[in-house]
């Protein structure tokens, strides 16, 4: 007889059609799409789903909301063809989904620091909620290009109060500069015992360097070109790891192993090696 786990795995791999129940425009180019799906509802912080847009492509998106009013969500930044279609979706529109896929954040430490850049906050909001359930209130740096690009500022403020701090590249709100620079300052002033980060790879690579210098363990959610999501095509390789299956969350030891590529080079959609530029 097939085990429950085997059946669950295969249930998650099937493409399901879901209806967009509601949308929330977070910023001029960022939208949260809410839908109902039994498997995604059981997803863990840091996991992602593959979202198929009829006529376009299938793209990976972090689960940004788990079981809010029975609905789950993804939060999309409009950066290209498929994300533009997703960003323009309205309640009643339908997409195909499969997953959740990948590993998840491990909840470590009693005084964690979380560093989010841009749409990276999408995968970190469920992590905050999971920490709060364990009565741990993390310090959260919410970074963005400008004040109108800060994702989930209201939600995070309600959850974290003064533990939420903001940085903007143009200085329009909070710390004037990159989230990674602010993280280094806060690490000097506080005894953080674990760091989590998701956002632009150059930001995460800098945060990794700062944690290494201080001997603080870190978990970072990496992006590579994800196609199959089940570890078969090899398109998402970094060092010996497949981001789709071994990641997307990399711990300190894994980051040390991939340091020759992390923040430096990656494969594009055709498998050609290109420089990481953001
Ligand atoms: C594990 C994971 C979680 C992600 N979570 C989110 C999220 O929560 N919100 C969000 O806005 N974005 C997220 N992304 C990035 C998102 O998948 C891409 O921005 C999206 O696929 C762009 O598709 P496009 O057709 O609009 O862009 P395109 O026009 O095809 O290309 C624009 C850029 O998007 C990137 N991209 C395109 N296709 C893929 C792909 N299949 N896999 C990875 N990157 C791709 C490339 O860097 C490319 O240069 C995640 C990526 C990964 C790997
Ligand atoms: S996307 Fe195919 S192996 Fe990772």
Image (cartoon, grey):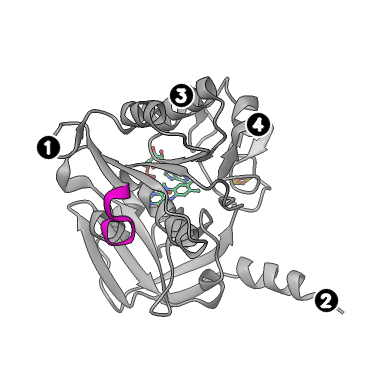
Q: Is residue 17 above or below residue 209?
A: below
**Percent position of residue 80, x then y:** 31, 46
Please name which of the two marks, 1 or 2, marks the residue nearer to the observer: 1
Marks 3/4: CA–CA distance: 15 Å
Local secondary structure at mark 4: helix
At horizontal 59% and vertical 57% (from top left) the residue drawn is 101
- Residue 251 lies, in percent from the top left, at 60, 38
Callout 2 touching callout 4 (CB < 8 Å): no
Quadrant where the C terminus sits is top left
- As drawn, the label of residue 4 is none
Question: Residue 172's mark?
Answer: 1
Question: What mark, if any, has residue 2 been given in the picture?
Answer: 2
Which of labels 2 and 4 is toward the front?
Answer: 4
Other residues around mark 4 within 10 Å, as few (<14) / some (14–19) / many (≥20): few
The span picked out in magenta is 157-163
The earlier-in-sequence mark between 1 and 2 is 2
Residue drawn at the location 40% of the way across and 62% of the way down: 53
Which one is in front in this view, the residue at disc 3 or the one at disc 1? 3
| Mark 4 to mark 1 CA distance (whole Å) | 36 Å
Within 10 Å of disc 1 (Cα), the crowding (few <14, some 14-19, many 20+) is some
Q: Which residue is mark 4?
A: 253
């Amino acid at each position: 007889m097939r085990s429950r786990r085997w059946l669950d795995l295969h249930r998650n791999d099937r493409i399901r059609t879901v209806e967009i129940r509601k949308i929330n425009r977070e910023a001029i180019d960022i939208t949260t799409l809410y839908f109902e799906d039994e498997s995604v509802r059981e997803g863990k912080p840091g996991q992602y789903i593959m979202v198929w847009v009829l006529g376009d492509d299938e793209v990976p998106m972090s689960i940004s909301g788990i079981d809010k009013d029975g609905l789950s969500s993804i939060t999309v930044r409009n950066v290209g063809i498929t994300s533009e279609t997703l960003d323009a979706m309205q309640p009643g529109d339908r997409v195909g989904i499969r997953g959740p896929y990948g590993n998840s954040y491990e909840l470590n430490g009693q005084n964690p620091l979380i560093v989010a850049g841009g749409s990276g906050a999408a995968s970190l909001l469920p992590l905050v909620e999971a920490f709060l359930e364990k009565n741990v209130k993390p310090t959260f740096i919410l970074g963005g290009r400008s004040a109108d690009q800060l994702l989930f500022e209201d939600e995070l403020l309600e959850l974290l109060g003064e533990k939420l701090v903001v940085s903007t590249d143009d200085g329009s709100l909070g710390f004037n500069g990159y989230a990674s620079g602010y993280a280094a300052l806060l690490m000097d002033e506080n005894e953080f015992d674990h760091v989590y980060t998701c956002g632009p790879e150059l930001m995460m690579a800098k945060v990794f360097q700062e944690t290494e210098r201080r001997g603080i363990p870190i978990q970072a959610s990496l992006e590579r070109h994800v196609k199959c999501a089940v570890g078969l095509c090899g398109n998402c390789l970094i060092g010996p790891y497949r981001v789709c299956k071994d990641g997307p969350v990399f711990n300190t030891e894994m980051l040390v192993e991939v340091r020759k590529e992390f923040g430096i080079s990656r494969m594009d959609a055709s498998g050609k090696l290109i420089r990481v530029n953001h």
